Image (spheres, rainbow, N blue to C red):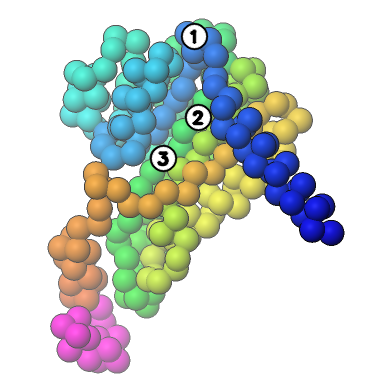
């Protein structure tokens, strides 16, 4: 029994070593589309993949973000404006990606969106507060994935969904944790369904890093904003000292 256990462990170690030594070859002409590239993880990843030789298509929410990214990248990196809460913007981005890939298909789709606010006690929130997060960080990412699936199938590419692992700990109300759990479920079902087409689907659960650390002042500002719009009945149920404590 002990020998069998040791053999199993050794087999796993060998598998991990072989797997981790695998590298993508012939990067020239392989297109990767990344969302959320204005700042943070998406921005850093776009620069890194560009240096590695991939044909990066970086989606930015602002013109400023696009210009700053292009200024420190190679000429092969392309940017496109994308508002994940707007279906028309998503459609335009898909057309742009289709034109850039020029019939080759899409090697990779990296979905990255970090909408956090508003967060707070659930009965402080309105349905539009949930929409403001879910429309971007869940439904928007799902919509653009669905529209890019034909290109991913053509290249037998891969989908990589970046999910902040801390969002999987539901410690406060709002759409943030809902969006992360939703992307987990979407990724799991998509992975099973896309196996038939040779498309891989992965989840990368990351933590906060320096570029996107949560600003407590911003959260406090949102909490006071929510507090000030509450009905007297709800405020009385919590008490005036609730925010101070």
Mark 1 and mark 3: span between their CA atoms? Answer: 22 Å
Q: Residue furthest right?
A: 1
The percent position of residue 61, horizontal first and vertical second, equals 29, 34
**Is 194 left, or right, of 86 in this rendering?**
right
Disc count in the image? 3
Asked if the residues shown at circle 1 and circle 3 are in contact, with their CB atoms under 8 angstroms apart, the answer is no
Query: Mark 3 = which residue?
Result: 112
Is residue 103 a member of the stretch shown in magenta? no
Rendered image: mark on residue 183: none
| Mark sitting earlier along the chain (1/2) | 1
Asked if the residues shown at circle 1 and circle 2 are in contact, with their CB atoms under 8 angstroms apart, the answer is no
The percent position of residue 152, horizontal first and vertical second, equals 59, 24
Rendered image: mark on residue 109: 2
Asked whether residue 80 is in view, the answer is: no
Is residue 242 a member of the stretch shown in magenta? yes
The percent position of residue 217, horizontal first and vertical second, equals 15, 63
Give the residue drawn at x 47%, y 33%: 110
Secondary structure at numbered mark 2: strand
Which quadrant holds residue 78? Answer: top left
Q: Which residues are magenta?
A: 229-245
Q: Is residue 89 above or below residue 162?
A: above
The percent position of residue 234, horizontal first and vertical second, equals 29, 86
Q: Is residue 68 above or below residue 173?
A: above
Rendered image: mark on residue 29: 1
Secondary structure at numbered mark 3: loop
Within 10 angstroms of label 1, few (less than 14), some, or many (20 or more) residues?
Answer: some
Secondary structure at numbered mark 1: loop
Which quadrant holds residue 22? Answer: top right
Quadrant location, the N terminus: bottom right
């Amino acid at each position: 029994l002990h020998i069998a256990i040791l053999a199993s462990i050794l087999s796993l170690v060998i598998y991990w070593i072989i797997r981790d030594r695998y590298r993508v070859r012939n990067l020239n002409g392989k297109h990767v589309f990344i969302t959320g590239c204005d700042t943070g993880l998406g921005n850093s990843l776009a620069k890194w993949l560009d240096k590695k030789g991939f044909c990066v298509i970086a989606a930015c929410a602002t013109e400023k973000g696009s210009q700053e990214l292009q200024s420190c990248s190679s000429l092969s990196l392309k940017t496109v404006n994308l508002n994940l809460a707007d279906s028309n913007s998503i459609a335009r981005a898909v057309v742009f990606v289709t034109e850039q890939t020029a019939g080759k298909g899409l090697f990779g789709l990296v979905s990255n969106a970090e909408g956090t606010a508003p967060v707070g006690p659930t009965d402080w929130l309105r349905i539009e507060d949930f929409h403001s997060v879910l429309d971007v960080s869940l439904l928007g990412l799902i919509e653009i994935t669905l529209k890019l699936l034909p290109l991913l199938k053509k290249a037998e590419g891969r989908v990589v969904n970046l999910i902040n692992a801390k969002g999987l700990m539901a410690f406060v109300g709002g759409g943030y944790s809902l969006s992360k759990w939703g992307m987990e479920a979407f990724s799991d079902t998509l992975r099973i369904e896309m196996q038939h087409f040779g498309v891989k689907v992965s989840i990368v659960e990351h933590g906060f890093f320096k570029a996107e650390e949560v600003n407590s002042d911003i959260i406090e500002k949102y909490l006071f904003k929510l507090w000030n719009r509450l009905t007297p009945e709800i405020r009385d149920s919590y008490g005036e000292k609730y925010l101070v404590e």
